[in-house]
Every structure is written in structure tokens, then in C-alpha cells.
Image (cartoon, grey):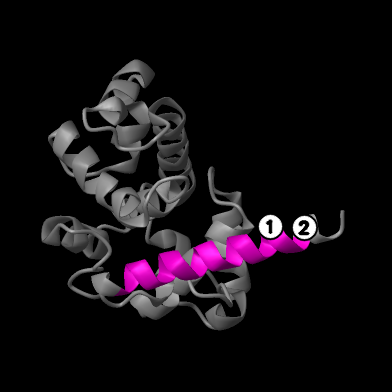
Amino acid sequence: MPDALPWTHSEEANRLLASSPLALMIGMLLDQQIKMEMAFHSPFALQERLGRPLDAADIASVDGGQMEAIFRGPPALHRFPKAMGQRTQALCRAIADDYGGDAAAVWRTAADGRELLKRLKELPGFGVVKSRIFVGIVGKRLGEGPEGWEGAAADWPSIADIAEFEQIDGLRQHKARMKAEQKARAGGGR
């Protein structure tokens, strides 16, 4: 594993992403409808607000109202604090129940890339796109992809391709162009 994943403005948050598989999975879960760097910083802020290291069973057991308050902040950990607090708890509950609380077991015990993709898609909040991006993170950034991970990973530019924080703006611009092209194609047939 690398010493840090440079996806936030905070070196501490970047180190947590690299050292805590659960933090990395929570960051990926939260990476929707907010800036990537905010999503990947939120696990660090969550850990600070809890006052203890991130633990799947612990997070799953926190009272829902308390989790909402933690997510609400200020500052908020996500644009949708109630829903994403609930989704984070659901993810943690699945990791606690199905993987003994070890988030890294999701990929370290997968037989191959197809099984890893299947496991990720079964997790709360991880659809096909998010799962394929995460397979890429495991293979490209962590160097821990199971055999055949390349075939299951996203085949488009994603956070898995970001090796330096300065590259995030370029990825954001690429995503905006892709969305604009999709929108133009969808509207072109009317």
C-alpha cells in the first residue's frame, strides 16, 4: 500500500485513505454529488468527530440520529447528511457482517477480478460504475488487485488514475466534457 493517496488538501486525510481500507471505502461511497476531494476527506473528519479510529461494527452501531448529527456538522460531511450517514452505516454493517469488519478482505480474499467486482456491487451504495472504479483503485493505487482485476476495472479516466492532487481538476474537466457530450447525444434525437 502507498503511504498516502493524494486526493484531498490534507496530508493526514491522504495518509488515512492509504492506511485504512474502511476509510477508503467510505470515501468512495461518499464520492457522489460533491467534490471528490470533499468525499475522500470526509472519512478523516468522521474519525475526528467519532474521537476514535474507524471501525465498521462501531460505525454500524452508532445511533442513527447521532450519525446524522455527525454528518451534518458543521461543516457537513456530505451534501445529503442524513441519507449518506445512513448509507455509510449500511456499508459498515455489511463489512462487519460479511467480512468480519475487515474492509480489505473484500479484495484480499477475492479469487479474481470478476469476484471482486461482484462483491463490491453487493455492498450498499456501490453500483456498477462505483464498483468498477474501486476495482481500479485496488489495482492501480494499492497494488493489491486480484488476478484479472484489469478486466473488471473502469476503462475510463477515474480517481483510480489520480497519482497527484493537481490531476483532480483535469479529471473533473474530463468528467464535465463527458456529461455534456452525453447530454448533447440524448437531446440530439428530439
Q: Which range of residues does the magenta coloring cover?
A: 167-185
From where the camera sits, is residue 109 visible?
Answer: no
Secondary structure beneath label 2? helix
- List x then y, in percent, for residue 132: 56, 66
* Kind of residue at badge 1: Lys
- Compared with 9, 1 (above or below) is below
Nearer the observer, 75 or 128: 75
- Give the spatial CA distance, label 1 vs label 2: 5 Å
Numbered mark located on residue 159 in the image: none
Disc 1 + disc 2, Cβ < 8 Å: yes
| Residue 188 belongs to the span the image colors magenta | no
Nearer the observer, 9 or 96: 9
Which residue carries the number 1 mark?
Answer: 183
- Residue at 32% from the left image edge and 25% from the top image edge: 67
Mark 2 crowdedness (10 Å alpha carbons): few <14, some 14-19, many ≥20: few
Question: Does 190 sit left or right of 6 as displayed?
Answer: right
- Residue at 18% from the left image edge and 59% from the top image edge: 9
Find the residue positioned furthest to the top. 65
Nearer the observer, 10 or 131: 10
Nearer the observer, 29 or 100: 29
Which residue carries the number 2 mark?
Answer: 186
Q: Quadrant location of residue 4?
A: bottom left
- Compared with 163, 64 (above or below) is above
Q: Main secondary structure of the magenta part?
A: helix
- List x then y, in percent, for residue 164: 26, 76
Find the residue positioned furthest to the right. 190
| Residue 175 belongs to the span the image colors magenta | yes
